[in-house]
Amino acid sequence: MDLSVIRDADVVVIGAGQAGLAVSRALAGADVECVVLERDRVASAWRHRWDSFTLVTPNWTIRLPEGGYQGDDPDGFLRRDEVVAHLAAYAASSPVPVLEGVSVTGLEPAQDSRILLRTSMGDVTVRTVVVCTGSFSRPYRPVAAALPSAIQVLDAVDYRRPDDVAPGTVVVVGSGQTGCQLAEDLHREGRDVMLACGRAPWIPRRLDGRDTLYWLAEAGFLDAPLSSLPAPSARLVSNPQATGRDGGHDLHYRTLQAMGVRLAGRLVAADEAELRFGDDLAASVAFGDARWADLCELMRRTLPGRGLAVPELEPPPAFRAEPVASVSTSEVSAVLFTTGYRPGFAGWVHAPVFDDLGFPVTDDGATAVPGLYFCGTHFQRTRGSGILYGVGADALRIAAVVADRIHGRRRPPLAEPAEGRRSG
């Protein structure tokens, strides 16, 4: 294979996750020739999830162009390998070639309104690029540098199963979806687990016998635009605490505390003697409760207009805050960071298209650099942009814009991705 495969394509899509595959399928439907470059394998990010991983959103939320969920368990939650299989089959059914094992290490504007790509196959200039590598690639590890060398330090991406973690007490830092799920995973295997908690929203798994995501989708929560956020930094707030494991169940501060996971505030300092936590556990729980109250108000306000009765919305029980203030390093065998990642585009995309937080500034995917587009970034257009629920709609809009630029007139795109079948 030579660089002409890349050079001659109308569009180069970078990344073969759900965003890249959705964009390439939508481009094919708009009569645009494209190629997908993937540094690893199709669905690489999903392949690196831990062994017990499942989707947190129900299967019916898989809404990709010509690739929605068609199985017999719409309200279930696909496991890691099932998600990979779904995306691999989606890629195999597409007319667009995916070049696996091709890394893109640099991107910058070039002459004649072209874009220079520095790839593992060599440098090449192309007409149009859609970056679909996801929002977050730079790990955020507060206080990690101060931890004693005797303590095993892992990021969530390094974790596969409890046996990977050194015997002894495990401190999980970060209490979003991943932190809660890994704390539960370790605890279920008999491990002593301490969770250093931050501010995160939570939801009950079900309301009136239906998944809470059903009610939130009907209320427009997942379609909320970026402009609805109180501040740009709100993009860094975690998704609501929940899990799809074992068919889905509640998983948040109260359930973890009840099962025996020790809760602490934020990890604020460490030295050779101890790890110290902030006195903010109660405030973090109150933050999550306030966000749940906001969601309850949204459902009360919007669902009747959709012809739906508002489900029973119970306030959370009182929380007993008995936070751990510190723990001796002699007790801790490992620290597992699940504090999330930050945008890492600036390390390889050398173009003036990012905001102060490192997110690309786009309009229907287009940036200030002609021919450079993004898809699949968190809150790019809506709250659903970075997940399987909303990325398909974004991909279709971007494909239409790209096709209009290439063909000089808008070609009919694929239909809006059909919502996966939900149980009644």
Image (tube, rainbow, N blue to C red):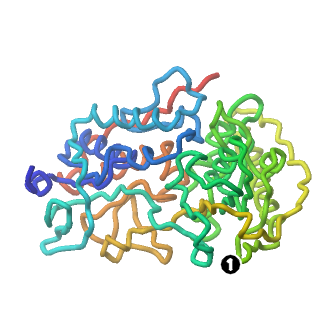
Q: Is residue 297 visible?
A: yes
Task: Give me the residue at 55% from left, 56% from top.
Answer: 156
| x, y percent for residue 6 | 14, 54
Label tally: 1
Asked if 227 appears above or below 78 in the picture, the reply is below
Taking depth in this image into account, of 421 and 308 the one nearest to the observer is 421
Asked if 309 appears above or below 349 in the picture, the reply is above
Task: Give me the residue at 11% from left, 51% from top.
Answer: 5
Taking depth in this image into account, of 64 and 363 the one nearest to the observer is 64
Q: Residues within 10 Å of mark 1 (few under 14, many from 20)?
A: few
Asked if 312 appears above or below 294 in the picture, the reply is above
Q: Is residue 226 left or right of residue 288?
A: left
Q: Is residue 161 left or right of residue 343?
A: right
Taking depth in this image into account, of 167 and 252 the one nearest to the observer is 167
Rendering quarter of residue 122: bottom left
Q: Quadrant of the C terminus?
A: top right
Q: Is residue 142 left or right of residue 278?
A: left
Taking depth in this image into account, of 210 and 268 the one nearest to the observer is 268
Task: Give me the residue at 62% from left, 58% from top.
Answer: 238
Asked if 206 appears above or below 255 in the picture, the reply is above
| x, y percent for residue 322 | 89, 61
Q: Is residue 235 visible?
A: no
Which residue position is annotated with label 1? 272
Mark 1: amino acid: Glu
| x, y percent for residue 3 | 10, 57
Please tell me whether mark 1 sits on a helix, a strand or a loop.
loop
Q: Is residue 178 left or right of residue 331?
A: left
| x, y percent for residue 131 | 33, 59
